[in-house]
């Protein structure tokens, strides 16, 4: 198991670096220009702000969800996976329906005779990134809360801890363990932002590194420049992962007996705070999604026939990547929990790679050997796995670590190894984060467009590619309806896996 | 058992007996799309060439040349279809193309004669708007800048229409281009990575106008029976986008590639273009009913070489004017 | 026979040496001030804490290089001796086959040991549904089923009440005497040692002293033991 973890970690590192090296080698070097530094500045700035805001908003929501019980709580927790798996353009359209020039908010403001607000510019980029990422942060932090054994809360109650003291002795150590990784994940993801930053950024002020890479690869065919930019992006992402690695401290709560006890639910202003957090999360989640999806539902009935085989292909790719990602992430997380901490970096770096450089590099590597079109689906599978790995790993890690500290020695002393250990210990104890990871991966690969476009020929279109073709052929309404289908099937997959994991959690 | 054995042997025999030549066409994704010209073009050419046409997608228009440069001489493509004249100088410089051997296309507003690249469709760039909301659209870039209308444009660093607009302003205003861009900056709602995002923002009612083509309203009239969309004529003239195809020098099917180039000029190919690509045909054939209302009075187009040499400086000008 | 040959344990701010052997079938108490290294000694024997030098033998077999599960011993920890997500029968069955693929006969043996520790009929319960005494008995039942020649007890009964603890010690003694297993048990209560231990190892001042007969040791305690006992 430990050797497999090292092998997979190395393979992930190679998969991140080899395409970059291939592009640089093909170009004969690396290049950067003066204008890139301002792109780097904007990229860093927006990623930093987006990650800070997402995490800050996620903490009260996760806290409220962990200690309050209300109708629809379980549905809300499932829905927290949703924005993350919306195709970016759908998410942007949803936000515009609320915050755009002719959106609900501004229509109301001007009806009241108040000045309207513009979503374009840095504020728009931030709103979109927070919308896409804060729910994920919430789930990651909530996972941390659920990893504190109920016995510790009972102990705290028996010592008459106030909520403030519970925070100091239980919640703060947990947050110190969970937050750095969550922050690094979101930061790295926002680093590679392209469409969101461009559409809502409002113009060339909002130039990200990923846009500069697009320009270098597509218009200028300046591969040296592209490789230089991609390297910069990976270095920054790697640095963030490294900082998170150093900052994170293992909380070490010890094991509990899996007794299910309600967490102390204080009244007074804390009840108000929790209610506000939950209300905010619900509105902010549902508003944009409903605004963009509801009007398009009527179009579902007359979707063109090409949509169905594309849906089948997307589902196949999604299920394949899910299996691959879960196995990989589980091996890495268990390996890291047993002391191979460098795997943290190997599992975070894929987030910071540029999809375009990854695709171009793979193309450069494969094209001399085999016609790229014949590899479209396998390559998509591999790349999807690589890109989903960081999330799955990050979700599994805290619980894998707790599992190792609490039961590692007992399992070792009983000679519980290999598959038996997986079946009797790791899988049942990690079912919840594993189900969530599987759902996330499935949904992510359903929506992926990145690499397939470089490799696909006419007969291999996936659903996102068909949607892109529809909107490129003026058929924006049909594209919107097909997007509803995509979102619905992504969400169904996500719901299925997440639910299964939560029910199977031992 | 005997029957299936016979069937098995005949299966083995077929590929050897009928070795159908394959013509590989590298093009942009929306050409191949079920809603693009690809399927009809493939069927029509296969019925006369006794060959198998295979379309390979190189992503969108802007990334086609990059794909070609990546593959270089080892490309399996015989024909490339979908470059525009802003990219042809760079394409020529790769040395990968061979002369097409066809006479120049005859229905372009500005003559375009190039031994390597043959136009198959074209249109003018224009700002498209909703007639019912804006009965008096601006008549020039300066009027647009003076108005409080909001437009969406595409980024010239990631999209061909975006690059087209950049060259349009440059061709119309030369040294005054930076000043025009500064004037436009408060009218630009946002800049999208590609055409479809911009057009989507416009149809959702987020923007008053969108940079698209003179032929875009035809889609709404013919495809959706919606007569509310129109394009705004600008007094400076309108910049052209001319889409071309070319033969790769390393093609292993040079005759077939030549035949395909001739086919792109035939009525069978050209008649598919207006209602699938929503562009003007490159040869003189009748337009579909309702396709055209009026034409711009003046056309602008840099030569291939000018477009190539102007681009970088124009881009820097654009960036600095809009970053203020 | 368990033999520690010039074993040296070291970690930041901690050092312990041991060089002695135990006769087979002896019940041995490990006693000494907290932090002196009683648990570390057991960890080293169990294979969780590799010595910096020296060798541990069981009979003629050296334990170095053997993983914890492969060593001829069973260890019971202070807590977490049972997996909370598995039933009692499954937890005990792990002692026969870590894969839990048990034959009918093996399942019957599980039921049998459950009965021996007075847990008959509770096999389908999860640990959270049991009391502390029941949990300790279940852990001991698994040790019985594993039937390894050495049993290491790292204070598994520390959390039990006095009566319950005496009952558990009696059970340990009964099991050990019946199977001929060597028992090494950490305790901080001299009464535990005096109750069942033939020999006692005193751990203090960086040394795990050679085992001495319990009665004699307490009758005439050396200075370190006097200090620990508060005499």
Image: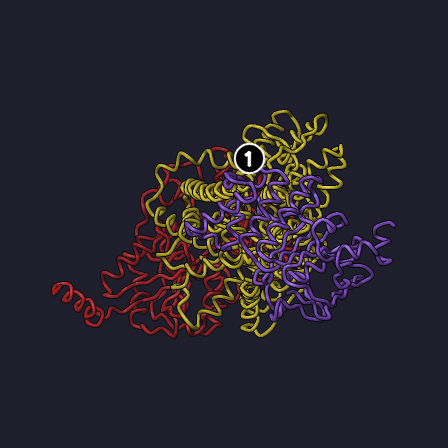
Chain colours: A yellow, B red, C purple
Left or right, B25 with respect to B9, comes to: right
Label tally = 1
Question: Residue B247: where, in percent of width, then height?
Answer: 37, 69
**Which residue position is annotated with label 1?**
A76
| Picture residue at 50% right of the left edge, 54% below the top | C96
The residue at 53%/73% (across/down) is: A26
**Mark 1 element type:** helix
Q: Is residue A65 left or right of residue B40?
A: right
Residue B188 visible, this orientation:
no
Q: How crowded is the residue under tag 1: few (<14 C-alpha within 10 Å), some, or many (20+)?
A: some
User: Image quadrant for the C terminus of chain A?
Assistant: top right
Q: Position of residue C225 (x, y in %)?
A: 83, 55
Badge 1: chain ID: A
Compared to residue A172, the image places residue B242 above or below, namely: below
Answer with left or right where residue C56 lies relative to residue B155: right
User: Which residue is depicted at the point 11% across and 65% down?
Assistant: B2
Q: Residue furthest left?
A: B2
Q: Position of residue C45 (x, y in %)?
A: 66, 62
Splitting the image into 4 quarters, where does residue A151 fall?
A: top right
Image position of C89 with respect to B45: above or below: above
Residue B64 visible in the displayed image: yes
Q: Nearer the viewer, residue B291 or A80?
A: A80
Pick the residue in front: C174 or A111: C174
């Amino acid at each position: 198991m430990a050797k497999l973890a090292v092998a997979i970690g190395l393979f992930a590192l190679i998969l991140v670096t080899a395409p970059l090296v291939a592009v640089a080698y093909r170009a004969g070097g690396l290049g950067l220009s003066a204008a890139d530094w301002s792109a780097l500045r904007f990229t860093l700035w927006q990623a930093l702000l987006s990650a800070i805001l997402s995490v800050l908003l996620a903490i009260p929501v996760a806290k409220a969800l962990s200690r309050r019980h209300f109708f629809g709580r379980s549905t809300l927790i499932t829905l927290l996976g949703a924005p993350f798996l919306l195709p970016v353009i759908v998410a942007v359209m949803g936000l515009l329906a609320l915050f755009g020039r002719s959106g609900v908010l501004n229509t109301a403001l001007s009806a009241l005779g108040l000045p309207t607000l513009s979503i374009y510019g840095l504020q728009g980029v931030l709103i979109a990134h927070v919308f896409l990422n804060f729910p994920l942060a919430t789930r990651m932090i909530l996972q941390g809360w659920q990893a504190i054994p109920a016995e510790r809360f009972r102990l705290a109650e028996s010592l008459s801890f106030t909520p403030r003291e519970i925070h100091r002795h239980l919640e703060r150590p947990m947050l110190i363990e969970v937050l750095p990784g969550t922050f690094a994940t979101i930061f790295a993801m926002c680093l590679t932002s392209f469409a969101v930053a461009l559409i809502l950024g409002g113009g060339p002020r909002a130039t990200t590194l990923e846009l500069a890479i697009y320009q270098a690869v597509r218009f200028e065919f300046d591969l040296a420049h592209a490789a230089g930019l991609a390297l910069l992006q990976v270095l920054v992402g790697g640095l963030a992962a490294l900082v998170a690695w150093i900052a994170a401290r293992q909380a070490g709560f010890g094991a509990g007996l899996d007794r299910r006890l309600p967490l102390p639910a204080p009244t007074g202003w804390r009840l108000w705070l929790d209610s506000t957090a939950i209300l905010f999360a619900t509105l902010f989640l549902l508003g944009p999604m409903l605004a963009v999806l509801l009007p398009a539902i009527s179009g579902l009935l007359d979707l063109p026939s090409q949509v169905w085989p594309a849906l089948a292909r997307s589902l196949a790719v999604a299920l394949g990547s899910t299996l691959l990602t879960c196995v990989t992430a589980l091996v890495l997380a268990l390996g890291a929990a047993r002391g191979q901490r460098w795997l943290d970096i190997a599992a975070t770096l894929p987030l910071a790679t540029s999809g375009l450089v990854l695709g171009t590099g793979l193309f450069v590597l494969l094209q001399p050997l085999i016609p790229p079109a014949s590899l479209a689906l396998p390559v998509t599978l591999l790349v999807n796995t690589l890109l989903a790995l960081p999330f799955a790993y990050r979700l599994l890690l805290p619980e894998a670590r707790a599992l190792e500290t609490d039961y590692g020695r007992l399992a070792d002393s009983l000679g519980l190894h290999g598959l038996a250990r997986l079946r009797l210990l790791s899988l049942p104890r990690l079912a919840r984060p594993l189900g969530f990871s599987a759902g996330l991966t499935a949904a992510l690969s359903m929506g992926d467009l990145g690499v397939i476009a470089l490799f696909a020929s006419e007969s291999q279109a996936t659903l996102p590619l068909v949607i892109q073709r529809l909107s490129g052929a003026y058929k924006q309404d049909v594209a919107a309806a097909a997007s509803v289908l995509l979102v619905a099937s992504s969400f169904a997959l996500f719901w299925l896996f997440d639910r299964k994991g939560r029910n199977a959690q031992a | 058992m005997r029957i299936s054995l016979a069937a098995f042997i005949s299966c083995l025999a077929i590929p050897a007996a009928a070795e159908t030549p394959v013509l590989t066409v590298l093009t942009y994704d929306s050409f191949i799309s079920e809603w693009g010209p690809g399927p009809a073009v493939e069927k029509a050419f296969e019925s006369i060439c006794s060959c198998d046409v295979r379309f390979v997608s190189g992503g969108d228009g802007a990334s086609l040349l990059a794909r070609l440069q990546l593959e270089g001489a080892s490309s399996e493509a015989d024909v490339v279809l979908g470059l525009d004249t802003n990219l042809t100088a760079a394409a020529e410089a790769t040395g990968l193309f061979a002369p097409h051997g066809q006479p120049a296309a005859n229905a372009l507003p500005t003559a375009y004669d190039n031994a390597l690249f043959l136009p198959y469709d074209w249109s003018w760039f224009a700002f498209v708007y909703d007639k019912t909301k804006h009965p008096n659209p601006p008549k020039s870039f300066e009027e647009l800048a003076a108005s409080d209308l909001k437009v969406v444009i595409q980024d010239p660093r990631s999209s061909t229409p975006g690059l087209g607009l950049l060259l349009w302003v440059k061709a119309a205003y030369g040294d005054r281009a930076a000043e025009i861009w500064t004037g436009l900056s408060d009218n630009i709602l946002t800049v999208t990575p590609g055409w479809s995002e911009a057009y989507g923002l416009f149809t959702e009612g987020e923007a008053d106008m969108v940079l698209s083509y003179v032929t875009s309203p035809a889609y709404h009239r013919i495809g959706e029976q919606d007569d509310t969309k129109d394009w705004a004529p600008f007094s400076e003239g309108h910049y052209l986008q001319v889409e071309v195809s070319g033969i790769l020098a390393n093609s292993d099917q040079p005759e077939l590639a030549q035949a395909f180039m001739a086919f792109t000029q035939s009525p069978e190919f050209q008649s598919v273009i207006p209602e699938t690509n929503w562009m003007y045909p490159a040869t003189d054939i009748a337009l579909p009913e309702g396709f055209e209302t009026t034409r711009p009075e003046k056309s602008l187009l840099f030569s291939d070489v000018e477009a190539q040499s102007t681009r970088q400086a124009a881009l820097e000008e654009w960036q600095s004017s809009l970053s203020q | 026979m368990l033999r520690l040959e010039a074993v040296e344990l070291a970690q930041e701010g901690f050092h312990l040496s041991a060089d002695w052997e135990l006769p087979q079938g002896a019940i041995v108490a490990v006693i000494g001030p907290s932090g002196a290294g009683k648990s570390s000694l057991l960890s080293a024997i169990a294979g969780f804490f590799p010595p910096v030098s020296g060798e541990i033998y069981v009979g003629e077999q050296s334990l170095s290089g053997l993983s914890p599960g492969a060593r001829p011993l069973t260890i019971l920890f202070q807590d977490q001796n049972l997996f909370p997500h598995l039933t009692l029968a499954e937890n005990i069955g792990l002692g026969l086959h870590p894969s839990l693929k048990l034959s009918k006969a093996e399942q019957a043996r599980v039921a049998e040991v459950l009965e021996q520790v007075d847990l008959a009929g509770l096999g389908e319960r999860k640990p959270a549904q049991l009391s502390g005494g029941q949990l300790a008995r279940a852990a001991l039942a698994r040790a019985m089923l594993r039937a390894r020649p050495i049993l290491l007890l790292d204070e598994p009964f520390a959390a039990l009440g006095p009566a319950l603890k005496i009952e558990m010690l009696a059970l340990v003694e009964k099991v050990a005497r019946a199977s001929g297993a060597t028992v090494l048990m950490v305790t901080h209560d001299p009464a535990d040692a005096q109750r069942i231990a033939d020999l006692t190892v005193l751990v203090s001042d960086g040394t795990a002293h050679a085992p001495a007969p319990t009665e004699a040791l307490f009758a005439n305690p050396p200075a370190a033991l006097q200090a620990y006992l508060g005499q």
